[in-house]
Amino acid sequence: MAPVVDRSIRALLGDDPDSVLVPESYDGLRSPRERGYVVESAAELLLKRKLDQIEAGTIAVCGPRGAGKSTLLESCVEDAGFGILAQAPATYAPHDFLLSLSVQLCETYIKSEGFEVPEFTRLSNVRRALRRAWTRCKKVLKWLIFALPALVLVALGSAAATRSAASARTDDVVAGAARHIEMLEMLARDTWNGQAAGTAVSLLLLGATWWRLRRATRWNYFGRFTLIFTWIVGLLLIVGSAIWALTDEDVQQRLSGVSPELLGKILLYLGVWFLCRKAVEENWRIPPGFMREAARKYCPMLGSATLFLLLIVVLRNPQTQAVLADEENPLRVALALLGLALMRAGSWEPRPGEPALVTQCRNHLYRLQTTQMSTAAIATGASQVLTLGTTHSTSISTVPPNFPEVVSDFRELLGNIAMKFQKRGDRVIVAIDEVDRLGSDTQALAFLSEIKAVLGVPHVHYLISVAEDVGAAFVRRGLPHRDVTDSSLDDVVYVQPTVLSESRVILARRAPGLSDPYVMLAHVLSGGIPRDLLRYGRHIMETREKTQSDELTDISRGLVLQELAETLSGFRTLLSKQHWTPDTHEILYAFRTLGAHLRGACPCTEREVQFALEHFAIHSPEILRSEPHPALPDTARQLIDEAAAYAYFSLTLLDIFGREGFDRRRQAAEALGTNGDPELLAEARQELGLSPYSARPLISAIREAWSLPLQPQSTASAIPAPRTRRCTLHALRGSE
């Protein structure tokens, strides 16, 4: 049935079955920063290879804005044994930036070691004492909530067995204790009277040995021996209880009645509980991300539910009830619980002291974030009668660290941390993001020159996000001169825009079920920039709700026209700042007229919008070249050419995606050569960001491959005026 139904549905959908927008979910598009939706890119693999090739160094990550540089840095910091991610300030001061970086380093390391970051707030001694007391009270209260009911239940369950065992063996225990006490009394009397010389010598040696145990190391050995002995006693109690139960004839007879099916079910529940516990404790080398978070969240719940089901199965089954009903089982369980308590006591370890590196970080934070003062005063008086006296007071205040001192302290502290993690085989990464937002490449290079002093720490990898021009300066180092990139950077990783296959993977993770034509549309509009790819994916869903249509022709047309209207509005705002004369006013008029067409676009005005867009995209540059305006500034000419080229690109998208038979026309275009490849449309969008003059021939070649006209179909000498009234048929849809 499945193949027949599939063919029937495709036959009903027509020539373009994938042009119908029916996504399964698009939650990933609404959460662009969610780490669970991030896919591994080629740039990430390249960066990991470069990190493996060098023990320490500085790698620049460059690429266009929105290409995923920040996501790449976050992934590397998350995968590292220890890492910090700092944001470069828009208006930087080297001293302030390094102070902030030092504070972040100290706080991150203190948290990673499981200690609390000190809060430098002004609290009175009373409030500080109350806060400390309240914290301890909460811990004691939480312990009592579980300890008291557990103690009552254990005492109630073991009371009868304990009384029975005590009554049966009380006389023997009392008699044995009396004999040992009498023997000790005789030994002490004989030693005191000088009749036991050997015992006296033994006591002298024992006293000297006990005195030597006062030292910390020897006392630690004695304490460890005591804990180990306690743990062994507990283990013997548990093993003895189990052997006692298994060698009891009544228990053996009742165990023989347990079916293999029930025994297998019990073992299955125990296995699932054990696996859940191990998954929570060790994470089983699960890589960071969505799976680790899911394991941490759901494995404890699954383990608790499995243990609860096991108790129900054991307590409600008649076969296991017969085994549990043995009269000596309460005493065996009590001994096993006592042994477990002794093993827990033997496994106790004193709370470790604060590591030296944590103390160093804490002291460094005090130095960076506080001003410490010390005051000493001495007052002297002649006598109680004469009040004449003198007072001497001194005040000492620490000087805030200067720039060289901050650099030295930062390098020393980071070097110590890196040495510790390097011995574990872990990597230390310091990532500095948003350097490309400093403005020009000159400012970015100046920033690198200032922070160069903290680079080059042994066993530390620095990742710095920079703009493309800074990466280009590193590539052409020595041609003809050298700059700061040559001495600051060890390598460069370019984060390139995605190709169509990579965009498919990204959108398949974030919006399952999104068909290929819509993936191509989002990829082409974004030019392969991942941030814009997600934005246009959301705009596709938004346009679907706005047009109330699931067809590619309606959604693509609405999306392209909306983007074009917003872009031309931005160009018109920039043009309004130029100097205009009566001879050049028709240019602004053309912008306003085309904007009016786009704002009132609907299916009834499709042909009019097409003519207006063709005239603006194709005729505007020709008019400027054939009828030059001397009064028109060069900046305005550049903006007009850029707007016309973008309109030419939008017109091409309307002709490709906004017509019926997309699959058939795409196959025909691809058969003509590389100019028909949809990937070339994304390259044309990227070329628009460089120059409209190089992008226009590329768009014309694409139109020729798709059999689209290179000249406007309308012969009008100007853009036709828009309708004075809105379309009543589509007014409601337009308002929505």
Image (tube, rainbow, N blue to C red):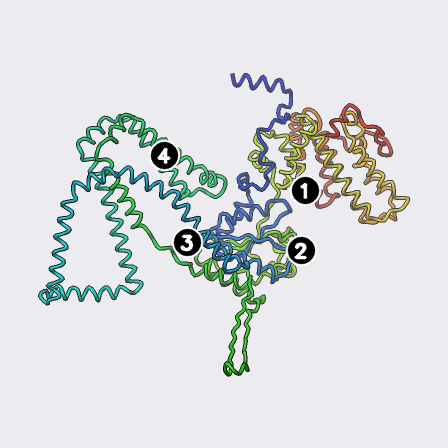
Residue 487 visible in this rendered orientation of the protein: no
Say whether residue 298 is left or right of residue 321. right
Q: In this figure, which residue is indicated by the disc labeled 2?
A: 441
Classify 10 Å Cα crowding around label 4: few (below 14), some (14-19), many (20 and above).
some
* Amino acid type shown at disc 2: Asp
Location of residue 479 in the rendering, given as x and y in whole percent from the top left corner:
64, 58
Task: Examine the image and state in which quarter residue 497 appears.
Answer: top right
- Do the residues bearing badges 1 and 2 touch, measured as CB atoms within 8 Å? no
- Res 496 visible: yes
Give amino acid for label 3: Arg
Q: CA distance from mark 3 to mark 2?
A: 39 Å
Can you identify the residue that label 4 sits on?
307
Of residues 189 and 570, the one drawn nearer to the viewer in this rendering = 189
Secondary structure under tag 4 reads helix
Indicate which disc, 3 or 2, sits on the residue closer to the N terminus.
3
Instruction: Kindly state the secondary structure of the residue where label 2 is placed.
Output: helix
3 vs 4, front mark: 4
Residue pointed to by mark 1: 686
Q: Give the label, 3 or 2, closer to the camera.
A: 3
